[in-house]
Amino acid sequence: MPKVKYLVVGAGVSGLGFANFIDSEDYLILEKESAAGGYCRTIYNGEYVWDYAGHFFHFANQELKNFFNSKIDPEDLINKEKNTKIFYKGEYIDYPFQKNIHQLSKDEFIDCLYDLFNKEEKNEYVGFEDMLYGKFGKSITEKFLKPYNEKLYACDLNSLDSNAMGRFFPYANIKEIIDNMKLEEDNSYNKEFLYPKKGAVTYINALLKELNTNSIIYDQEVIDIDVKNKVVTTTTDKFEYEYLINSAPFDHLIKYIDSKEYERTKEKLTYNKVLVFNLGFDKKSSIEDMHWVYVPDKDINFYRFGFYDNILDSDKLSMYIEIGYESDAELNIENQLELTLKNLKEIGVINDHKLLAYSSIIMNPAYVHISNEGNSLKNNKKKDLQDHNIYTIGRYGDWKYCSIEDSMIDAMNLAKELNEV
């Protein structure tokens, strides 16, 4: 049975990041797929470059900037100032909705402004939806914030923690909203972004560059973790470890360790799944300046769509479409593709365009549901696991809403901590 000091579950950005920053060659990465990257992979279909979902990069951490600058030619990257919109009642208004209510019709603007000034804030909120009403009032909440997030998360919004999206939620107070009516300003964390000309896999290739190819074993799905004896069993082998670094979904980790505990706790660790369509057409859309668009209308099947061609400056329409579902929902991909094309035509993104190529991906889990119960369970379990030299990191391993950069910072910080042991 192979034995390593650091056994890493998952060759996504978190697992690969850890392997890059740990001061040891004694590591092994187990990946259940046949390629590295997790959801940060790229599909090449003729002239179209598509990712598994819309991935855009906003590095604020200088150490990570330096790391990737040393491995990626700047000529391989495109820097864009974000142009994002909301498709609302047949019009495109600027995102975020709450800062751009002055772009609505006069009656709707008055409704939003009136409710904003008469909202009833609380010291504590029972959930995410309750927070939306308290901070933004009835009109802003019901015109955009509630329907959009219900489409995205596919759940009762009050089952989510009031701070479920953390720093990524675009809060705005009354002064900011009023000021934005005259001097529009984007203070979001991703107002500028990088995108690789060859897709998000460019960053995965950079993470792989210095790693020993023999230290990653593909097609190795974990099925059991023996915490006492420090042994991981996969579908084909067993591995002994000193430290276990997990980046697989947190609920999977619990199941690997104790299936009975998983059955008792799985209702506290819920999530949605997302069907992603990548679509390649024969010519450009009339929409040549937008990067991605949010859609709150529940009569339209997708909650967001984006334009790869407007980012890569290519000459044919290349898109991604995202559709949210409950985790156990049954999907009819052909029907959803037909409905997607119909809706794209109705909202004017396409007209007589011909679909030349497409792919579909199911992300499951996609967005985890952050709740008080789930956070409490996770934090208590993590303390117990760390007593047994098991660490769980990243968006899914740490069961949180975060960016790709945040996942790599998790990995980098853990590696630094273990380097000092």
Image (cartoon, rainbow, N blue to C red):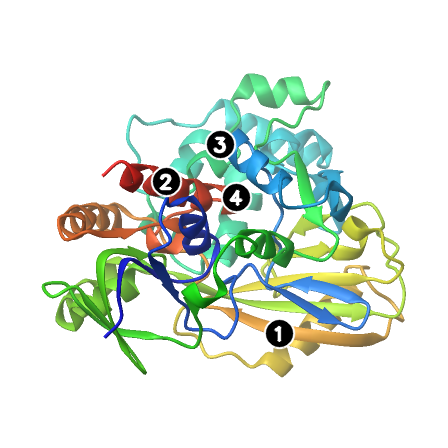
Residue 396, horizontal then vertical, whole percent: 38, 55
Residue 306, horizontal then vertical, whole percent: 70, 55
Examine the rendered structure and indicate whether residue 271 appears above or below residue 386: below
* Residue name at image x 82 percent, y 76 percent: 356
Calculate the distance from the C-alpha at mark 1 to the C-alpha at mark 2: 35 Å
Calculate the distance from the C-alpha at mark 3 to the C-alpha at mark 4: 9 Å
Q: Which residue is mark 2?
A: 130
Residue 98 in sight from this viewpoint: yes
- Mark 2 nearby-residue class (10 Å; few <14, some 14–19, many ≥20): many
| Near-viewer residue (25 or 217) | 25
Labels 1 and 2: the sequence-earlier one: 2
Calculate the distance from the C-alpha at mark 2 to the C-alpha at mark 3: 10 Å
Labels 2 and 3: the sequence-earlier one: 2
Q: Secondary structure at mark 3?
A: helix
Labels 1 and 3: the sequence-earlier one: 3
**Image quarter in which the C terminus is found:** top left
Q: Which residue is mark 1?
A: 360
Labels 1 and 4: the sequence-earlier one: 4
Q: Which mark is residue 275?
A: none
Residue 87 in sight from this viewpoint: no
Q: Secondary structure at mark 1?
A: strand
Labels 2 and 4: the sequence-earlier one: 2
Q: Amino acid at mark 3?
A: Phe
Left/right placement of residue 15 relative to residue 324 reads left
> Pointer 3 and pointer 4: residues touching (CB < 8 Å)?
yes
Left/right placement of residue 77 relative to residue 361 reads right
